[in-house]
Image (spheres, helix red, strand yellow):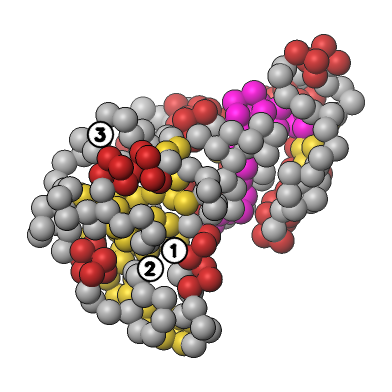
Amino acid sequence: MTNVPLDPRYEVGALYSRLLDIHDVLGGQQRSGISTPPKSPFVIIFTGEAGKQHGYNDRWDDNGHFHYFGEGQIGDMQDKRGNRAIREHLVNGKRLVVFQMMGHSRPCRYMGEFRYINSYKEPGIPDTKGTPRVAIVFELEPLNTDSIGFFNTRDFQTMLELDSTSTDKLTEVRTKQSLFKRRLLSFEKECRITGIADLRFLRASHMKPWSACETGSERVDGANGLLLTPHADLLFDRGWITFTNAGRIECSSHLPAEVIKRIGLNLKSRRATGEFSEEQCAYLAFHQSHVYDKTFKKACDPIAELLATSKS
């Protein structure tokens, strides 16, 4: 098993047509959640919100491992076909690659290569008909543990501020940032301002800043984040803009009109980008009251900035 990209055309975080870019290239069943092309050295699995109607609840644990629900829409899941292909992919010399489904008729996002660690049974999971059944859940480890196609500049700066000898601390921060970004994708699929979904051009923004989080759980909670393009991330991070719970942009009156005109973002749009979930609103409330229309003012005052940094 290697960490070599499966094909130069695939980049982690990028979007691909399931038919033209995935199955026409790698083969495999076009409608299955677990695709097993017989003449290709890959097992291809798909994750996404559509699986929830069948009781699938794919998720990330605190160790950065992905728990993927096996196939089988009705009745107890069985150790056969795609499920067995995942469990035996290492023995069979197959590489396990994961794509995230973005919605009907939309491209899929490449999440990278994984390897099988463990599997277990989870009872009481409703099938397509709502009948409780036993599900097979696979614990998978990503091979690309440090990156999933995008990062946050502020997070990177936090790492650089650590003592150069604090290797363990640096590793811990990287692990937490990676987990936060992966969990964020369960809540947000694209930049709410531009609509860009390719992770290579996005950043992960905390609503409640890393330094303000009271617990480690808040720092890695996917509900505490947004996907934004770099210039939108800058405005959000500094408090020049925020969002209402309904998803509308709020723009500070202090943001220069010339910037609004030339930055290339439709900041005056009253169009709602979609309501935030109840979990997200709790973090968004912090941004609305403690970051919006405030943080950029502190940054203009060297003394205030110094005091804020010393307290974080």
- Residue 115 at x, y percent in the picture: 24, 54
- Mark 3: amino acid: Asp
- Badge 1 crowding class, 10 Å Cα cut-off, few under 14, some 14 to 19, many 20 or more, is some
Foreground: disc 1 or disc 3? 3
Q: Which residue is mark 3?
A: 7
Q: CA distance from mark 3 to mark 2?
A: 26 Å
Q: Which residue is mark 1?
A: 58
**Viewer-side residue, 39 vs 1:** 39
> Tag 2, which secondary structure?
strand
Taking 308 as reference, is 253 left or right? right
- Badge 2 crowding class, 10 Å Cα cut-off, few under 14, some 14 to 19, many 20 or more, is many
Q: Is residue 86 above or below residue 251?
A: below
Magenta stretch: give its range: 217-241
Q: Earlier in the sequence, mark 1 or mark 3?
A: 3
Q: CA distance from mark 1 to mark 3?
A: 26 Å
- Mark 1: amino acid: Asp
Q: Which residue is mark 2?
A: 69
Q: Earlier in the sequence, mark 2 or mark 1?
A: 1
Q: Is residue 219 magenta?
A: yes
> Tag 3, which secondary structure?
loop
Say which quarter of the image contains residue 58: bottom left
**Viewer-side residue, 269 vs 230:** 269
Q: Earlier in the sequence, mark 3 or mark 2?
A: 3
Foreground: disc 3 or disc 2? 3
